[in-house]
Structure formats: structure tokens, C-alpha cells
Image (cartoon, rainbow, N blue to C red):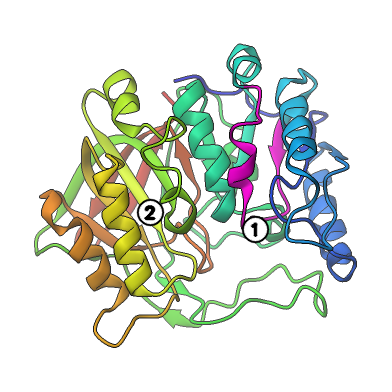
Amino acid sequence: MRYPAPLRPGDRIGVTAPSAGVDDGLRARLDVAIRTVEARGYEVIVGSCMDGTGHVSAPAADRARELTGLLTDPAVKAVVPPWGGQTAIDLLPLLDWDALRAAEPTWVVGFSDMSTIITPLTLLTGVATVHGNNLMDTPYRAPEGLLTWLDIVTMAPGTTFTQVPPNRHRAQGWDDYRTAPEVNEFTLDTPGRWRRLDGDGDVLAEGRLIGGCVETLSDVAGTPYADVPAFARAAAPDGLLVYVEAGGHDAGDVCRQLHGMRLAGFFTGANAVLVGRTNAPGTAGLTQHEAVLDALGGLGVPIVADVECGHVPPYLPIVNGARGRLVCTADRNELTQTLG
């Protein structure tokens, strides 16, 4: 694994939208988010692929060119999108993968549709990426026990850090950035802990971390852009900790998508599976937890659900490629990551 250099005040961070852009009604929130990053002492540059009038910010070739340019510019130390979207998958065959492999590592951050970019980046280049809150979420203060991507990108290779959940989350909905662009406090109105789905007993599992959003990675798993078995053989001979999270598809869709990911080898080498908390609906005969068990229960490894690594605030950032240590007991939930 290769880890980007830790960011220091004065470093440059690039903002681009590989998937959805930002419409005029949300520009105030974007400005607040940029000021949050600048307050840490960084210079922020905003690319030209940011238009929010359509489902993507620019034609695929333009988005791929801008992202490749930022990732190969030695002056840019990190790249973060405003948020996800729907069709970042169209960038994958257009990115200059040889140039990305040859460039000095750059931190890339994001979740949701950004899984379509950051997970292949780690799998194909060996560079760690951060599955964490996007730029528009960055103004929120992390609850005690959790970090933000801005904390993680300052860490040097070899650093070990542990996150523990606050045991509270937001039950439904999102803050309205159009009417409250400066909101920076999570509304965590519902108690909830991690939960082992596959049985009883304590969980202690280790492995290299890889994963992302079910809805987007299910379309990439098994292609040359998401060859997890090859990654496991090369970088994780002792096994993986695979994490997945569903953004909004109902339990029937998620069940089918997870089955497909399993058939494509996405869980090959897993020592445990982490499942993000979701507000996505069930179906008449299937809950989201039951969907996970239907698809992954036969793996024979611990499955820990309701982890803060998905679309439900707050956010527990996970570094793709880091070494992980998962603990889930009656009185202790924690994920330790080592950038090594």
C-alpha cells in the first residue's frame, strides 16, 4: 500500500465533482464548506466540473480529464467532491490509469457514488483513499469518538487511530442546506449500537479494509476495476475487512446486489464484514438486515451491522487499504486503523 503525504497548512486541496455538481441554490453551502477547509490553513481550488443543472457536472471526458489532472498535479495534496451522485461509473474507462499509478499519491475523499472512484483507485493503484464525509458534509463537527476526513489526511504513514461510535444517530432525513447553509451540528436523535447479525458472541477480527456503497459498487464488482480477489492476494494475505453500505435501495434490491457482489468475488478473503447503518426501506418480506444475511450469511465470518460508515449521520471515515482491527462486544464497539 502507498499512503499520501500528510497535509500541512498551506497545502492545496482540489474540489471537483466526478458525478453530480452543485446547483445555484446550494452554492451557499458549498461556500461554507470551502471556508471550513480554508480555516484549517489549506488553499482550496475549485475545478470547472461543478455544474449542478444536470445529473452530472460535465461530460464524462471533461470530468475524467479534470480528476486525472488534479491527481497528477504535485501541488494538489488532496481531492474532495461536493458529494456523490449517480453515474461516476462512466469515468472509469476514461481515467489515465498509467498516469495515476505513476503519480505521487494524493488523498481522495468521498462516499456514496464516490465509491465508484475511490475503491478502484485503491484496488488498481495501491494508493489509500478515504471513504468518509464529502465536502458538503465537512462543516459538521464530529461527535466525540469519531474523526473527519480533515483529521485523517494529516496523518503520516504508520499512524494508528481508533474510532468509537457515539451510539446515537439521525433517524430520518437530512438538514436542508438551501435554508440552513451554515448548519454544523448533527441532529443525533436516536440511540443505536453496532449489532452482530450472524450469531452471538464477541467479534475480534483483523484485515485490510476495502469496501463502499452497495448500489454503485455492485455494478463494478467483478470487472477489472474492482478485482478484490487480486487485491487480497497482493496486499492482504492475512485477509480483509470488507465494509458495505446501502444508500437508498430497498431490501430486495440490496439482497440481489450483495449476492452479485459475492458471486463476483468482492467478499473473497474477508475475515469479517461491516455493514453501514441505513434508512433504506425493507420490503413486505425482507428487512435490510435480513437481506444482508440472505446474501452473506453463508460466508461463515462475523457480520457487524449498523456501523457509522454510510448515508446515516454521523460518519465514521474508513481508509481503503489501511489495516483494520474490529471489536464488537456487549460493552465495546471500535474500529482501529493503521496506515501501514
| Whole-percent x, y for residue 314 in the image | 53, 65
Figure check: 44 above or below 6: below
Name the image quarter holding the N terminus. top left
Residue beneath the point at 84% across and 60% down: 32
In contact (CB < 8 Å): disc 2 and disc 1: no
Q: Earlier in the sequence, mark 2 or mark 1?
A: 1
Res 85 label: 1
The reply, left or right, for residue 38 in relation to residue 263 is right
Name the image quarter holding the C terminus. top left
| Whole-percent x, y for residue 17 in the image | 74, 47
Foreground residue, 261 or 306? 261
Figure check: 107 above or below 113: above
Could you say whether the residue bearing mark 1 is in a helix, strand or loop? loop
Residue range (magenta) = 78-96
Residue beneath the point at 77% across and 26% down: 69
In this view, the mark in front (2 or 1): 1
Residue beneath the point at 83% across and 67% down: 26
**Residue 131 visible to an observer of this rendering:** no
| Whole-percent x, y for residue 307 in the image | 37, 61
Distance between the Cα atoms at labels 2 and 1? 17 Å
**Residue 294 visible to an observer of this rendering:** yes
Q: Indicate the amino acid at tag 1.
A: Gly
Neighbour class for label 2 at 10 Å: few (<14), some, many (≥20)? many
Identify the residue under disc 2. 244
Figure check: 57 above or below 307: above
Foreground residue, 27 or 60? 60
